[in-house]
Amino acid sequence: MATARGSRIFAALGVIASALILAGPSFGAKKPPSGKAPPVEPPMKVLIVRSAQDGCEPNCPEWIAAQGKIMPGTLAQFRKVLNQLGNRNLPVLVYSGGGLADEAMTIGRLLRGKGLDVGVAKTVFTPCAPDASACRKKEGNKSLRGLPDPGFSVCASACAFVLAAGKRRFVRLPAFVGVHRGEMIQTKVLHIYRLTPYRADDGSIRIARKLLEERVMSERHLATPEKTFNVYAKYFSEMGVEKQIMPLLMSTPNDGVHWLTDEELRSTRLATHKMSGEQLVTGSKVVGDGWTASAPTPAPGAFGSDCTLRGVNCAWQFNAPAQGTGGGVPAKQSR
């Protein structure tokens, strides 16, 4: 039997490989607080959701909700959820300010391999949030219930790679899609381990190593290498997105976001349908692609058919410089 014979602390300073970060402003609020850094977006959660719409049982629609920052481990969540689905294909509703580009592209290829549709929309959970265990126990919920939020939704930066992966890609105001160059972040990290010698069954002395602490010592923010844009262009081409997306992305610095107009979404094919996430998950009858189909006269306060990011004939305006390349976020008009 192996027996511990003492231990010591060992500190190792290592450099984590540079990660390509594509992350826009935080979108927890419609507008970052003045003079303060925006709150950090929580890591993405990927969940199967069943509609909480009254009267939909026993045929309530289901979808995959993917919300938050794309981080290490997000890909594993997608794989777990897709394994749970088996042969079922559910649409994906994504709501994210960005994250790791490589992770996002790998997720994208996984979704395209499954032939899934992707729409931009936030999911509102009801009556219980995913992490509200006490609420879910009280309600006796065996599955997460929710509704697509018809309000403000965002898919920015690295999230655009996930959207591009959809076999069909649904975007309609007040959902916004943004792109920019991104940056490389090289992080130097101090790892502190406890080393414990022990005797193995074969009589040899071995060392067990346990990580006690991981401390960030420094970060370097580097410009995105030009060759990385070739990787982006190849990925978008693979997904059927037109090459016009690249000038929009490359011309926008990391501290800004270019919010795509309706025409840009259509011409780049980053969106294939001018329709909402709700229309995607409910399986509403699709007439054409939503860009050319005639639209009914909007009700008072609803969005007009020619509503654009610059606030023409709609209740939303683009709260940024006129060319749409600033770091502001879309905000609701006060009328």
Image (spheres, rainbow, N blue to C red):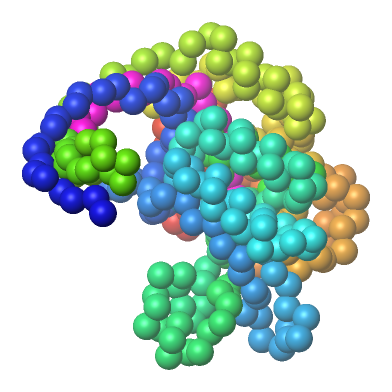
| Residue 142 position by quadrant | bottom right
Residue with the most extreme top position: 226
Residue with the most extreme front position: 203
Residue 279 seen in this snapshot: no
Say if the magenta span includes residue 45: no
Q: Horizontal placement of 53 versus 207: left or right? A: right
Residue 273: x %, y % from top left = 79, 47
Question: Who's the residue at 15% across and 49% down the image?
Answer: 4
Residue 307: x %, y % from top left = 67, 47
Residue 177: x %, y % from top left = 59, 40
Q: Which residues are magenta?
A: 175-191
Q: Is residue 318 above or below residue 226?
A: below
Q: Is residue 14 above or below residue 78?
A: above
Q: Quadrant of the N terminus?
A: bottom left
Nearer to me, 120 or 81: 81
Question: Who's the residue at 62% across and 41% down the image?
Answer: 107
